[in-house]
Image (cartoon, rainbow, N blue to C red):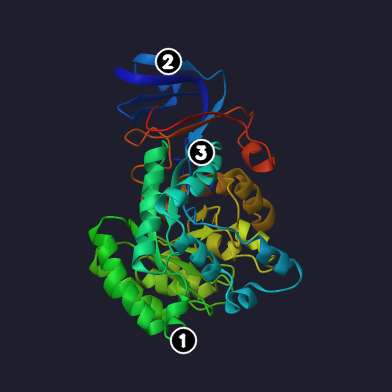
Amino acid sequence: MDCDRLWRNARLATLTCDRSGLSEVEHGVVACRDGRIVFAGPAAEAPLFSPVIEHDCEGRWITPGLIDPHTHLVYAGDRAGEFEARLDGASYEEIARAGGGIVSTMRATREASEAELVAAALPRLDALIAEGVTTVEIKSGYGLRLADERKQLRAARRLGEERPVEVRTTFLGAHAVPPEHRGDPEAYLAEVCEAMLPALAAEGLADAVDAFCEGIAFSPEQVRRVFEAAGRHGLPVKLHAEQLSNRHGAALAAEYGALSADHLEHLDEPGVEAMARAGVVATLLPGAYYFTRETQPPPIAALRRHKVPIALATDSNPGTSPLTSLLLVMNMGATLFRLSVAECLAGVTREAARALGRLDELGTLEAGKRCDLAIWDIERPAELVYRMGFNPLHARIWRGQ
Protein backbone atom coordinates (compact mmCIF):
# COMPACT_ATOMS: atom_id res chain seq x y z
CA MET A 1 0.00 0.00 0.00
CA ASP A 2 1.30 3.47 -0.89
CA CYS A 3 1.66 6.25 1.67
CA ASP A 4 3.44 9.58 1.80
CA ARG A 5 4.95 9.16 5.24
CA LEU A 6 5.32 6.38 7.76
CA TRP A 7 6.19 6.68 11.44
CA ARG A 8 7.39 3.34 12.83
CA ASN A 9 8.90 2.05 16.05
CA ALA A 10 6.50 4.27 18.01
CA ARG A 11 4.30 3.92 21.03
CA LEU A 12 0.82 5.28 20.40
CA ALA A 13 -1.89 6.81 22.53
CA THR A 14 -4.66 6.65 19.94
CA LEU A 15 -7.44 7.99 22.25
CA THR A 16 -9.94 5.85 20.35
CA CYS A 17 -11.27 4.03 23.42
CA ASP A 18 -14.02 4.97 25.83
CA ARG A 19 -13.35 7.70 28.39
CA SER A 20 -11.38 5.51 30.80
CA GLY A 21 -8.11 5.03 28.91
CA LEU A 22 -5.74 6.11 26.16
CA SER A 23 -5.87 3.03 23.87
CA GLU A 24 -2.12 2.53 24.10
CA VAL A 25 -0.18 0.60 21.45
CA GLU A 26 3.31 -0.47 22.49
CA HIS A 27 4.77 -1.28 19.04
CA GLY A 28 2.92 1.06 16.74
CA VAL A 29 2.88 2.50 13.25
CA VAL A 30 1.18 5.58 11.78
CA ALA A 31 0.89 5.91 8.02
CA CYS A 32 -0.29 9.01 6.15
CA ARG A 33 -1.41 9.74 2.61
CA ASP A 34 -2.50 13.15 1.31
CA GLY A 35 -2.58 14.60 4.81
CA ARG A 36 -4.80 11.89 6.29
CA ILE A 37 -4.09 8.85 8.41
CA VAL A 38 -4.47 5.60 6.50
CA PHE A 39 -3.35 3.37 9.39
CA ALA A 40 -2.63 3.83 13.09
CA GLY A 41 -2.13 0.75 15.22
CA PRO A 42 0.08 -2.23 16.01
CA ALA A 43 2.93 -2.80 13.59
CA ALA A 44 2.02 -6.48 13.46
CA GLU A 45 -1.37 -5.57 11.96
CA ALA A 46 -0.15 -2.93 9.51
CA PRO A 47 -0.40 -3.48 5.75
CA LEU A 48 2.84 -3.59 3.78
CA PHE A 49 3.48 0.09 3.07
CA SER A 50 5.77 1.68 0.48
CA PRO A 51 6.33 5.08 2.04
CA VAL A 52 7.93 8.01 0.29
CA ILE A 53 9.42 9.12 3.62
CA GLU A 54 9.89 6.87 6.65
CA HIS A 55 10.59 8.02 10.21
CA ASP A 56 12.03 5.87 12.97
CA CYS A 57 10.48 7.19 16.19
CA GLU A 58 12.95 5.23 18.34
CA GLY A 59 10.28 4.31 20.84
CA ARG A 60 8.86 7.80 21.26
CA TRP A 61 5.17 8.34 22.03
CA ILE A 62 2.74 9.68 19.44
CA THR A 63 -0.54 11.31 20.44
CA PRO A 64 -3.04 13.21 18.33
CA GLY A 65 -2.03 16.83 17.85
CA LEU A 66 -3.22 18.90 20.79
CA ILE A 67 -6.34 21.04 20.45
CA ASP A 68 -7.12 24.22 22.40
CA PRO A 69 -10.92 24.60 22.19
CA HIS A 70 -11.37 27.91 24.03
CA THR A 71 -9.13 30.96 23.56
CA HIS A 72 -9.41 34.72 23.21
CA LEU A 73 -6.04 34.87 21.45
CA VAL A 74 -6.62 38.02 19.36
CA TYR A 75 -6.56 41.25 21.36
CA ALA A 76 -4.46 44.34 22.03
CA GLY A 77 -2.98 45.61 25.28
CA ASP A 78 -2.76 43.84 28.61
CA ARG A 79 -4.38 44.01 32.04
CA ALA A 80 -1.42 43.70 34.36
CA GLY A 81 -2.76 46.66 36.34
CA GLU A 82 -5.96 44.76 37.06
CA PHE A 83 -3.88 41.81 38.20
CA GLU A 84 -2.25 44.09 40.75
CA ALA A 85 -5.66 45.36 41.83
CA ARG A 86 -6.87 41.81 42.42
CA LEU A 87 -3.77 41.13 44.50
CA ASP A 88 -4.86 44.09 46.62
CA GLY A 89 -8.30 42.55 47.09
CA ALA A 90 -10.46 43.82 44.23
CA SER A 91 -12.81 41.22 42.75
CA TYR A 92 -13.33 40.41 39.08
CA GLU A 93 -16.85 41.88 39.31
CA GLU A 94 -15.65 45.10 40.99
CA ILE A 95 -13.03 45.67 38.31
CA ALA A 96 -15.56 45.05 35.54
CA ARG A 97 -18.17 47.38 37.04
CA ALA A 98 -15.52 50.12 37.39
CA GLY A 99 -14.88 50.10 33.65
CA GLY A 100 -12.06 47.58 33.58
CA GLY A 101 -12.17 43.96 32.51
CA ILE A 102 -13.46 43.17 29.04
CA VAL A 103 -14.23 46.83 28.24
CA SER A 104 -10.62 47.77 29.01
CA THR A 105 -9.35 45.29 26.41
CA MET A 106 -12.09 46.47 24.05
CA ARG A 107 -10.66 49.98 24.00
CA ALA A 108 -7.16 48.76 23.12
CA THR A 109 -8.46 46.35 20.52
CA ARG A 110 -10.57 48.99 18.81
CA GLU A 111 -7.51 51.22 18.51
CA ALA A 112 -5.36 48.49 16.95
CA SER A 113 -5.25 47.67 13.24
CA GLU A 114 -5.84 44.17 11.92
CA ALA A 115 -2.12 43.85 11.19
CA GLU A 116 -1.27 44.93 14.73
CA LEU A 117 -3.68 42.36 16.16
CA VAL A 118 -2.08 39.62 14.06
CA ALA A 119 1.41 40.67 15.14
CA ALA A 120 0.40 40.72 18.81
CA ALA A 121 -1.30 37.31 18.62
CA LEU A 122 1.42 35.45 16.73
CA PRO A 123 3.74 34.98 19.76
CA ARG A 124 0.82 33.62 21.75
CA LEU A 125 -0.07 31.23 18.94
CA ASP A 126 3.57 30.23 18.51
CA ALA A 127 3.76 29.29 22.19
CA LEU A 128 0.82 26.92 21.73
CA ILE A 129 2.25 25.46 18.52
CA ALA A 130 5.59 24.84 20.25
CA GLU A 131 3.80 22.48 22.64
CA GLY A 132 2.18 20.39 19.92
CA VAL A 133 -1.07 22.31 19.31
CA THR A 134 -2.41 21.72 15.80
CA THR A 135 -5.92 23.22 16.18
CA VAL A 136 -7.02 26.29 18.12
CA GLU A 137 -10.34 28.04 18.60
CA ILE A 138 -10.20 31.86 18.68
CA LYS A 139 -13.09 34.05 19.82
CA SER A 140 -13.89 37.65 19.04
CA GLY A 141 -15.63 39.68 21.75
CA TYR A 142 -13.18 42.53 22.29
CA GLY A 143 -14.53 44.72 19.50
CA LEU A 144 -18.20 44.91 20.53
CA ARG A 145 -19.18 46.69 17.31
CA LEU A 146 -19.34 45.27 13.83
CA ALA A 147 -16.18 46.76 12.34
CA ASP A 148 -14.03 45.66 15.25
CA GLU A 149 -15.59 42.22 15.70
CA ARG A 150 -14.96 41.70 11.97
CA LYS A 151 -11.39 42.92 12.44
CA GLN A 152 -10.78 40.40 15.22
CA LEU A 153 -12.21 37.49 13.26
CA ARG A 154 -10.26 38.45 10.14
CA ALA A 155 -7.10 38.61 12.24
CA ALA A 156 -7.86 35.15 13.65
CA ARG A 157 -8.31 33.75 10.15
CA ARG A 158 -5.02 35.35 9.09
CA LEU A 159 -3.24 33.54 11.91
CA GLY A 160 -4.27 30.29 10.24
CA GLU A 161 -2.65 31.53 7.04
CA GLU A 162 0.54 32.66 8.78
CA ARG A 163 1.10 29.38 10.61
CA PRO A 164 0.47 25.66 9.90
CA VAL A 165 -2.47 25.33 12.30
CA GLU A 166 -6.23 24.97 11.98
CA VAL A 167 -8.04 28.02 13.38
CA ARG A 168 -11.71 27.79 14.31
CA THR A 169 -13.34 31.18 14.79
CA THR A 170 -16.17 31.98 17.19
CA PHE A 171 -18.25 35.17 17.22
CA LEU A 172 -18.56 36.39 20.82
CA GLY A 173 -20.37 39.68 20.33
CA ALA A 174 -22.41 38.99 23.47
CA HIS A 175 -19.33 39.23 25.67
CA ALA A 176 -20.07 42.53 27.42
CA VAL A 177 -22.13 45.67 26.90
CA PRO A 178 -19.93 48.38 25.32
CA PRO A 179 -19.86 51.91 26.77
CA GLU A 180 -22.01 53.37 23.99
CA HIS A 181 -24.84 51.04 25.07
CA ARG A 182 -24.30 51.25 28.82
CA GLY A 183 -27.62 50.91 30.60
CA ASP A 184 -29.33 49.57 27.48
CA PRO A 185 -28.19 45.97 26.89
CA GLU A 186 -31.32 45.23 24.85
CA ALA A 187 -30.33 47.76 22.22
CA TYR A 188 -26.85 46.27 22.06
CA LEU A 189 -28.25 42.74 21.73
CA ALA A 190 -30.42 43.91 18.87
CA GLU A 191 -27.25 45.10 17.15
CA VAL A 192 -25.53 41.77 17.84
CA CYS A 193 -28.44 39.68 16.55
CA GLU A 194 -29.73 41.85 13.70
CA ALA A 195 -26.57 43.46 12.33
CA MET A 196 -23.33 41.86 13.50
CA LEU A 197 -24.23 38.20 13.38
CA PRO A 198 -25.92 38.27 9.94
CA ALA A 199 -23.03 40.23 8.41
CA LEU A 200 -20.29 38.01 9.86
CA ALA A 201 -22.17 34.85 8.95
CA ALA A 202 -22.62 36.07 5.37
CA GLU A 203 -18.89 36.78 5.17
CA GLY A 204 -18.06 33.29 6.45
CA LEU A 205 -15.99 34.64 9.32
CA ALA A 206 -17.57 32.63 12.15
CA ASP A 207 -17.62 28.87 12.67
CA ALA A 208 -19.72 29.20 15.85
CA VAL A 209 -21.42 31.72 18.14
CA ASP A 210 -20.72 32.17 21.86
CA ALA A 211 -22.11 34.33 24.68
CA PHE A 212 -21.24 35.16 28.29
CA CYS A 213 -24.13 34.21 30.56
CA GLU A 214 -23.42 35.88 33.90
CA GLY A 215 -24.63 38.59 36.24
CA ILE A 216 -22.02 41.03 34.91
CA ALA A 217 -22.82 40.09 31.30
CA PHE A 218 -26.06 38.67 29.85
CA SER A 219 -29.06 36.87 31.32
CA PRO A 220 -30.31 33.50 30.06
CA GLU A 221 -33.22 35.27 28.38
CA GLN A 222 -30.82 37.58 26.54
CA VAL A 223 -28.58 34.67 25.56
CA ARG A 224 -31.62 32.91 24.16
CA ARG A 225 -31.98 35.76 21.65
CA VAL A 226 -28.39 35.25 20.54
CA PHE A 227 -28.86 31.50 20.17
CA GLU A 228 -32.03 32.00 18.14
CA ALA A 229 -30.18 34.37 15.82
CA ALA A 230 -27.30 31.90 15.45
CA GLY A 231 -29.78 29.19 14.52
CA ARG A 232 -31.28 31.36 11.79
CA HIS A 233 -27.84 31.52 10.19
CA GLY A 234 -26.99 27.85 10.65
CA LEU A 235 -24.22 28.41 13.19
CA PRO A 236 -23.65 26.13 16.20
CA VAL A 237 -23.49 27.70 19.65
CA LYS A 238 -21.27 27.57 22.72
CA LEU A 239 -21.62 29.29 26.08
CA HIS A 240 -19.57 30.79 28.89
CA ALA A 241 -21.69 29.41 31.73
CA GLU A 242 -21.72 29.16 35.52
CA GLN A 243 -18.31 30.78 36.01
CA LEU A 244 -19.15 33.20 38.82
CA SER A 245 -22.66 32.10 39.76
CA ASN A 246 -25.32 29.61 38.74
CA ARG A 247 -27.48 31.29 36.09
CA HIS A 248 -28.60 27.93 34.64
CA GLY A 249 -26.76 28.72 31.44
CA ALA A 250 -25.63 25.12 30.97
CA ALA A 251 -29.23 23.94 30.81
CA LEU A 252 -29.94 26.66 28.26
CA ALA A 253 -26.91 25.54 26.23
CA ALA A 254 -28.25 21.99 26.34
CA GLU A 255 -31.67 23.15 25.16
CA TYR A 256 -30.03 24.55 22.02
CA GLY A 257 -27.73 21.56 21.46
CA ALA A 258 -24.62 23.61 22.11
CA LEU A 259 -21.23 22.18 21.24
CA SER A 260 -19.98 23.03 24.71
CA ALA A 261 -20.62 24.88 27.93
CA ASP A 262 -17.43 26.36 29.35
CA HIS A 263 -16.09 27.25 32.85
CA LEU A 264 -18.88 25.59 34.93
CA GLU A 265 -17.53 26.14 38.44
CA HIS A 266 -21.06 26.78 39.74
CA LEU A 267 -22.81 24.14 37.65
CA ASP A 268 -25.55 22.22 39.49
CA GLU A 269 -26.80 18.65 39.11
CA PRO A 270 -29.78 19.52 36.87
CA GLY A 271 -27.41 21.39 34.60
CA VAL A 272 -25.12 18.37 34.42
CA GLU A 273 -28.07 16.12 33.62
CA ALA A 274 -29.24 18.47 30.85
CA MET A 275 -25.75 18.54 29.32
CA ALA A 276 -25.57 14.75 29.43
CA ARG A 277 -28.90 14.34 27.66
CA ALA A 278 -27.94 16.80 24.93
CA GLY A 279 -24.35 15.63 24.48
CA VAL A 280 -22.89 19.02 25.42
CA VAL A 281 -19.16 18.97 26.20
CA ALA A 282 -17.97 20.47 29.49
CA THR A 283 -14.94 22.61 28.61
CA LEU A 284 -13.06 23.32 31.83
CA LEU A 285 -10.67 26.26 32.15
CA PRO A 286 -8.34 25.68 35.10
CA GLY A 287 -6.14 28.63 34.14
CA ALA A 288 -8.97 31.07 34.83
CA TYR A 289 -9.88 29.19 38.03
CA TYR A 290 -6.28 29.51 39.20
CA PHE A 291 -5.69 33.09 38.08
CA THR A 292 -8.86 34.50 39.65
CA ARG A 293 -8.28 32.46 42.81
CA GLU A 294 -11.66 30.77 42.54
CA THR A 295 -12.42 28.35 45.36
CA GLN A 296 -15.32 26.31 44.00
CA PRO A 297 -14.18 23.76 41.41
CA PRO A 298 -16.46 22.38 38.71
CA PRO A 299 -18.55 19.36 39.81
CA ILE A 300 -16.19 16.72 38.42
CA ALA A 301 -17.87 13.79 40.19
CA ALA A 302 -21.25 14.71 38.74
CA LEU A 303 -19.81 15.17 35.26
CA ARG A 304 -18.22 11.73 35.49
CA ARG A 305 -21.34 10.14 36.92
CA HIS A 306 -23.46 11.41 34.04
CA LYS A 307 -20.73 10.68 31.46
CA VAL A 308 -20.46 14.26 30.24
CA PRO A 309 -17.38 14.61 27.98
CA ILE A 310 -14.73 16.85 29.58
CA ALA A 311 -12.45 19.06 27.49
CA LEU A 312 -9.66 21.32 28.75
CA ALA A 313 -8.55 24.67 27.31
CA THR A 314 -6.25 27.58 28.11
CA ASP A 315 -8.94 30.31 27.94
CA SER A 316 -5.95 32.41 26.84
CA ASN A 317 -7.02 36.01 27.46
CA PRO A 318 -5.50 39.18 28.93
CA GLY A 319 -7.64 39.49 32.04
CA THR A 320 -8.35 36.17 33.71
CA SER A 321 -6.09 33.59 32.05
CA PRO A 322 -2.98 35.00 30.35
CA LEU A 323 -1.88 31.46 29.64
CA THR A 324 -0.46 29.89 26.48
CA SER A 325 0.46 26.38 27.65
CA LEU A 326 -1.85 23.38 27.22
CA LEU A 327 0.74 21.25 29.00
CA LEU A 328 0.34 23.42 32.10
CA VAL A 329 -3.45 23.30 31.66
CA MET A 330 -3.30 19.51 31.87
CA ASN A 331 -1.29 19.71 35.07
CA MET A 332 -3.78 22.21 36.49
CA GLY A 333 -6.66 19.97 35.47
CA ALA A 334 -5.08 17.15 37.44
CA THR A 335 -3.94 19.10 40.50
CA LEU A 336 -6.81 21.58 40.86
CA PHE A 337 -9.73 19.52 39.54
CA ARG A 338 -8.39 16.01 40.30
CA LEU A 339 -8.76 14.78 36.74
CA SER A 340 -6.92 11.61 35.79
CA VAL A 341 -4.06 11.45 33.29
CA ALA A 342 -6.40 9.86 30.74
CA GLU A 343 -9.04 12.55 31.29
CA CYS A 344 -6.45 15.32 30.87
CA LEU A 345 -5.02 13.89 27.64
CA ALA A 346 -8.45 13.19 26.23
CA GLY A 347 -9.44 16.72 27.25
CA VAL A 348 -6.90 18.32 24.92
CA THR A 349 -7.38 15.84 22.05
CA ARG A 350 -10.55 13.78 21.59
CA GLU A 351 -12.91 15.80 23.79
CA ALA A 352 -11.46 19.11 22.63
CA ALA A 353 -12.24 18.05 19.07
CA ARG A 354 -15.75 17.13 20.18
CA ALA A 355 -16.13 20.58 21.78
CA LEU A 356 -15.39 22.16 18.38
CA GLY A 357 -17.67 19.84 16.44
CA ARG A 358 -14.59 18.38 14.75
CA LEU A 359 -14.40 14.87 16.17
CA ASP A 360 -15.09 13.44 12.70
CA GLU A 361 -11.78 14.95 11.53
CA LEU A 362 -9.53 15.39 14.56
CA GLY A 363 -8.71 14.27 18.08
CA THR A 364 -7.83 10.57 17.70
CA LEU A 365 -5.34 8.46 15.77
CA GLU A 366 -7.44 6.48 13.33
CA ALA A 367 -7.75 5.97 9.60
CA GLY A 368 -9.55 8.72 7.73
CA LYS A 369 -8.74 11.53 10.15
CA ARG A 370 -6.37 14.41 9.57
CA CYS A 371 -2.76 13.42 10.18
CA ASP A 372 -2.17 15.87 13.03
CA LEU A 373 0.36 14.33 15.43
CA ALA A 374 2.48 15.24 18.43
CA ILE A 375 5.60 13.11 18.95
CA TRP A 376 7.01 13.19 22.47
CA ASP A 377 10.32 12.40 24.17
CA ILE A 378 8.70 10.70 27.15
CA GLU A 379 8.66 7.27 28.74
CA ARG A 380 4.98 7.29 29.64
CA PRO A 381 2.01 9.57 28.86
CA ALA A 382 1.69 10.64 32.51
CA GLU A 383 4.80 12.79 32.04
CA LEU A 384 2.77 15.18 29.88
CA VAL A 385 0.52 15.88 32.85
CA TYR A 386 2.98 15.47 35.69
CA ARG A 387 5.77 17.87 34.76
CA MET A 388 5.49 21.68 34.95
CA GLY A 389 7.48 24.12 32.84
CA PHE A 390 8.82 21.26 30.72
CA ASN A 391 8.16 20.72 27.03
CA PRO A 392 9.11 17.25 25.77
CA LEU A 393 7.79 17.77 22.23
CA HIS A 394 10.06 16.05 19.70
CA ALA A 395 8.07 16.86 16.56
CA ARG A 396 4.72 18.32 15.58
CA ILE A 397 2.99 17.07 12.45
CA TRP A 398 0.18 19.02 10.81
CA ARG A 399 -1.69 17.54 7.85
CA GLY A 400 1.08 14.98 7.47
CA GLN A 401 3.89 17.56 7.27
Q: Quadrant of residue 198?
A: bottom left
Residue plotted at (47% across, 82% down): 182
The residue labelled by disc 2 is: 54
Nearer the observer: mark 2 or 3; the answer is 3
User: Where is residue 393 drawn, in percent x and y?
Assistant: 58, 31
Task: Give the mark nearer the N terminus: 2 vs 3.
Answer: 2
Q: Residues within 10 Å of mark 1 (few under 14, many from 20)?
A: few
Q: Residues within 10 Å of mark 3 (few under 14, many from 20)?
A: many
**Left or right position of 40 against 290:** left
Near-viewer residue (148 or 255)? 148
Near-viewer residue (108 or 132)? 108
Which three-letter amino acid code belongs to the residue tagged 3? Ile
**At numbered mark 2, what does the secondary structure look like: helix, strand or loop?**
strand
The residue labelled by disc 1 is: 183
Near-viewer residue (345 or 262)? 262
Which three-letter amino acid code belongs to the residue tagged 2? Glu
Task: Give the mark nearer the N terminus: 1 vs 3.
Answer: 3
The residue labelled by disc 3 is: 129
**At numbered mark 1, what does the secondary structure look like: helix, strand or loop?**
loop
User: Where is residue 245 drawn, in percent x and y?
Assistant: 57, 76
Near-viewer residue (184 or 389)? 184
